[in-house]
Image (cartoon, rainbow, N blue to C red):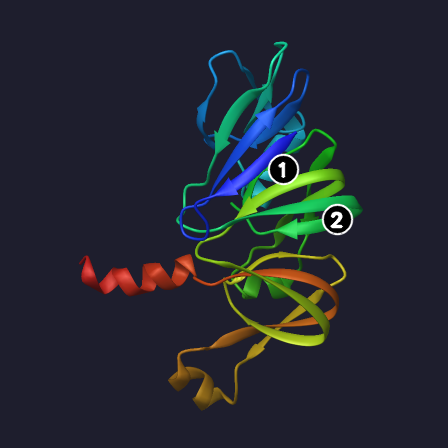
């Protein structure tokens, strides 16, 4: 499978070329355009029960679309996300990664989707009790609101709430005040997310919750 991510960083889209017999799985609604001869089948994401778990605990759709090239010539497909922002490809080699709800766009058939316990610290940080877990050997495409920043954590690293998009399960998080009580309230930062461990994280440069907070007083 060949692919190219175009229009980065604000309006990223994935241009996929499937050779004969190749398949890619995408989140429901991710398809922007495709060749007319490309086969598309909609199914539960991993079966009914796993799909329900991912829907209610991982923040993903009940369904995924399976695109397969059943012809004898290469066919193209364009995938995108609903928010304005960048898209990244993650290469899995037997490892796992956690994705925030809504970040997953597509993956190759060798990648397994599941739900992992993120912990109460993640919930207090506004990231949810559960995360979508991707594992296996293959490629995963995920997106974010704004630009994507890759960072290697070794020790401790502080992230503002709602900016963490993806991280290794080796990274542990805890919630804390950005300073003392008065400084935390007056600075507007409030609670922050303290990450500890050794692994890779991906951050988004913008926060949807921050956008909502900005727009709320203007639309009343």
Q: Secondary structure at mark 2?
A: strand
Residue found at x 71% / y 57%: 168
Q: Which mark is residue 42?
A: none
Q: Secondary structure at mark 1?
A: helix
The x, y position of residue 220, in whole percent, is 17, 58
The image quadrant of residue 188 is bottom left
Relative vertical location of residue 123 with respect to residue 140 in this rendering, above or below: below
Marks 1 and 2, how far apart in space? 18 Å
Residue found at x 44% / y 57%: 146
Q: Is residue 204 rendered to the left or right of residue 118?
A: left
Q: Which mark is residue 53?
A: 1
Q: Is residue 118 rendered to the left or right of residue 165?
A: right
Residue found at x 66% / y 56%: 118
Which one is closest to the eye, mark 1 or mark 2?
Answer: 2
Which comes before the other along the chain, label 1 or label 2?
1
Circle 2 is placed at which residue position?
96
- Between residue 169 and residue 70, name the one nearer to us: 70
Are the residues flagged by discs 1 and 2 in contact, CB closer than 8 Å? no
The image quadrant of residue 177 is bottom right
- Between residue 33 and residue 2, name the one nearer to us: 2
């Amino acid at each position: 499978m060949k692919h190219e991510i175009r229009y980065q960083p604000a309006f990223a889209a994935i241009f996929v070329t499937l050779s004969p017999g190749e398949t890619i799985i995408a989140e429901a609604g991710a398809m922007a355009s495709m060749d007319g001869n490309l086969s598309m089948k909609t199914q539960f994401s991993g079966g009914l029960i796993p799909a329900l778990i991912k829907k209610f605990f991982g923040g993903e759709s009940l369904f995924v679309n399976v695109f397969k090239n059943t012809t004898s010539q290469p066919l193209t497909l364009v995938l995108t996300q609903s928010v304005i922002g960048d898209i990244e490809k993650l290469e899995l080699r037997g490892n796992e990664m956690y994705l925030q709800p809504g970040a997953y766009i597509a993956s190759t058939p060798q990648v397994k989707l599941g739900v992992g316990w993120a912990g109460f610290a993640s919930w207090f940080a506004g990231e949810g009790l559960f995360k979508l877990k991707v594992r296996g050997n293959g490629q995963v495409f995920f997106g974010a609101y704004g630009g994507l920043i890759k960072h290697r954590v070794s020790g401790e690293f502080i992230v503002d709430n709602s900016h963490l998009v993806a991280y290794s399960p080796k990274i542990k998080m805890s919630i804390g005040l950005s300073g003392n009580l008065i400084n935390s309230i007056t600075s507007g930062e409030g609670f922050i997310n303290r990450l500890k461990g050794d692994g890779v994280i991906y951050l988004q440069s913008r926060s949807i919750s921050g956008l909502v907070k900005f727009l709320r007083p203007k639309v009343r």
